[in-house]
Amino acid sequence: EAGVVQSPRYKIIEKKQPVAFWCNPISGHNTLYWYLQNLGQGPELLIRYENEEAVDDSQLPKDRFSAERLKGVDSTLKIQPAELGDSAVYLCASSSPSGPYNEQFFGPGTRLTVL
Amino acid sequence: AQSVAQPEDQVNVAEGNPLTVKCTYSVSGNPYLFWYVQYPNRGLQFLLKYITGDNLVKGSYGFEAEFNKSQTSFHLKKPSALVSDSALYFCAVRDSFNQAGTALIFGKGTTLSVSS
């Protein structure tokens, strides 16, 4: 089966510009996560979706970050405007609906560089 | 608050020797524990998990982990290291009593370097 797909893989932008990341989860996985991974750190949750509903967005900086999962499948994470400190890897993950302790499957990530 | 600690930034072992990557955790209830591996420019790959049952959990690529409740540890082990095991390893935890969500709390990672 296909894994979690993310695009683009790399993005370089200047500060104050907008940027968007796209994620396509594994087919049938209704839970989707966006994580932020700073250099030398473990991933940290930004937002979690159950189908199209954002059920945990407490760590999402809502002044500049937004996300959507309109049809409960693909998801987009947006930053507007980007700041230098947003340079990081943005990981998307998905898990199946059969239990909260099921493993999450991660995409390759989008490496963002803000100049 | 839930937390995970990986006390070693880097572990160096020779090929063929046993390896251990350490992890300790802190949760308010029963823990669900995971190990993931990350190769350069790739996403995290699941290795193994502990939910309940036997304290020794076997996973992918010959890895295993030992759950120790009294020491609140979940160390990753492999009897004989391979050069191809060189990567970044993350321990993660989910608190079974956390009703707010199923997100994982990750440690900062340990770089494993296996020399030939």
Image (cartoon, coloured by chain):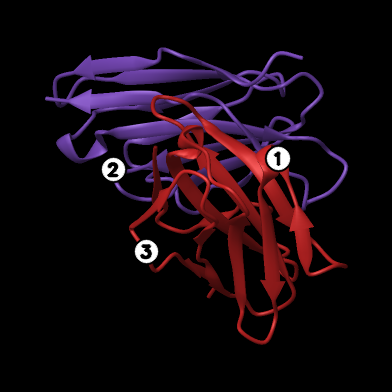
Chain colours: A purple, B red
Q: Do marks 1 and 2 both belong to one polypeptide chain?
A: no
Give above or below for A102 relative to A4.
below
Secondary structure of residue under mark 1 = helix
Q: Chain of mark 3?
A: B
Q: Nearer the viewer, mark 2 or mark 3?
A: 3
- Neighbor class of circle 2 (other Cα within 10 Å; few <14, some 14-19, many 20+) is few
- Check if mark 2's residue and mark 3's residue have beta carbons within 8 Å: no
Question: In the drawing, does residue A16 fall left or right of residue A52?
Answer: left
Q: How many residues crowd around disc 1 within 10 Å: few (fewer than 14), some, or many (20 or more)? A: few
Quarter where residue A83 is shown: top left
> Percent position (x, y) of residue A24?
62, 17
Q: Position of residue B2 (x, y in %)?
A: 55, 71
Q: Is residue B100 visible?
A: no
Q: CA distance from mark 3 to mark 1?
A: 22 Å
Distance of label 1 from label 2 (alpha carbons): 26 Å
Pointer 3 residue: B8
- SS at mark 2 in the image: loop
Task: Give, as a three-letter code, the residue at label 3.
Answer: Glu
> Residue flagged by tag 2: what amino acid is it?
Leu
**Image point (67%, 38%), residue name:** B61
Judging by the rendered image, the residue that carries numbered circle 1 is: B60
For mark 1, name the chain.
B
Q: Amino acid at mark 1?
A: Ser
Give me the residue at 39% from left, 37% from top.
B116
Of the pair A52 and B18, the residue shown nearer to us: B18
Q: Element at badge 3?
A: loop
Q: Which residue is mark 2?
A: A39
Please state if A17 lies on the left or on the right of B95 as rendered. Answer: left
B92 or B6: nearer the viewer: B6
Q: Position of residue A64 (x, y in %)?
A: 32, 36
